[in-house]
Image: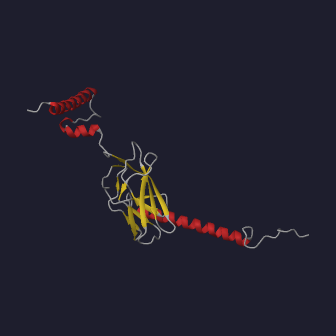
Amino acid sequence: MHLTGATPTPGTASSPEGTASVLNETYTKMTSDILAERTLGDFLSEHPGELVRTGSPHFVCTVLPPHWRSNKTLPVAFKVVALGDVIDGTLVTVRAGNDENYCAELRNGTAVMKNQVAKFNDLRFVGRSGRGKSFTLTITISSSPPQVATYTKAIKVTVDGPREPRSKTIKKQYPFCQCNTTTSTPFIKSVYLLFLSAAFLFKSSASFYLFFSPRI
């Protein structure tokens, strides 16, 4: 007796040919991913501290400073480097955002790919990321099909930018009264801190007097 559908159709996944085809596709994808990861590691080792990984193994970008002032030129021109083939003239767009400012204002946020590198001319972060928060960059490559890479916790942007701690600022203003607080006795430490407080109050009082004193 013959049962309908008992014989497997040639070319399906249950046939040896179909199984071999699926295995070949999986192996090819794994091989390409391994090669891309190896290429990425080699490329980053050649440029230590200059480039950083993105969410895509096919793109790296310039390392951004962890904290920066709003609307200030970056210390190094921002670049996006393609590890694969991207046609010259392909548009590359950078966007920044987080849960507080989902679409931050940027200046000069577009560039064109040339020789696998898209160099941004004076990219500036105008929008602020918020207190204690950083932006995540979304890099869109307008290829066919389009490709997207992300740079998480890329940069914190504030109005004033990074500032030195108050202790360092006081030591710069009063260099003649520096002492080694790690090896000094408790009495010397107390006198030193008292002197710094008095100097700071004196400066504040002098500024207050000059500001509110009557003009003659």
Please name whichever residue, 149 or 27, is drawn nearer the observer in this view of the structure: 149
Relative placement, left or right, of 192 versus 66 is left
In front of the other: 63 or 213: 213
| Residue at 74% from the left image edge and 70% from the top image edge | 15
Q: Residue 202: image x %, image y %?
A: 18, 30
Indicate whether 68 appears above or below 213.
below
Direction from residue 99 to residue 193 in the image, left or right: left
Q: Residue at x 10, y 33 (%)?
A: 215
Q: Quadrant of the C terminus?
A: top left
Residue drawn where x is 39% and y is 44% of the image: 130
Residue sticking out furthest to the top = 187
- Does residue 170 appear to the left or right of 133 in the view shown? left
Q: Which residue is outermost to the right?
A: 1
| Residue 199 lies in quadrant | top left
Looking at the rendered image, the quarter that the N terminus falls into is: bottom right
Quadrant for residue 166, please give it. Answer: top left
User: How many callouts does the rendering have?
Assistant: 0
Coloration mode = secondary structure
Query: Quick one: which residue is furthest to the left in this view?
Result: 216
Q: Between residues 185 and 178, which one lies in front from this camera angle? A: 178
Horizontal and vertical percent for residue 162?
Answer: 32, 45
- Residue 120 position in % (x across, y down): 36, 62
1 in relation to 54, above or below: below
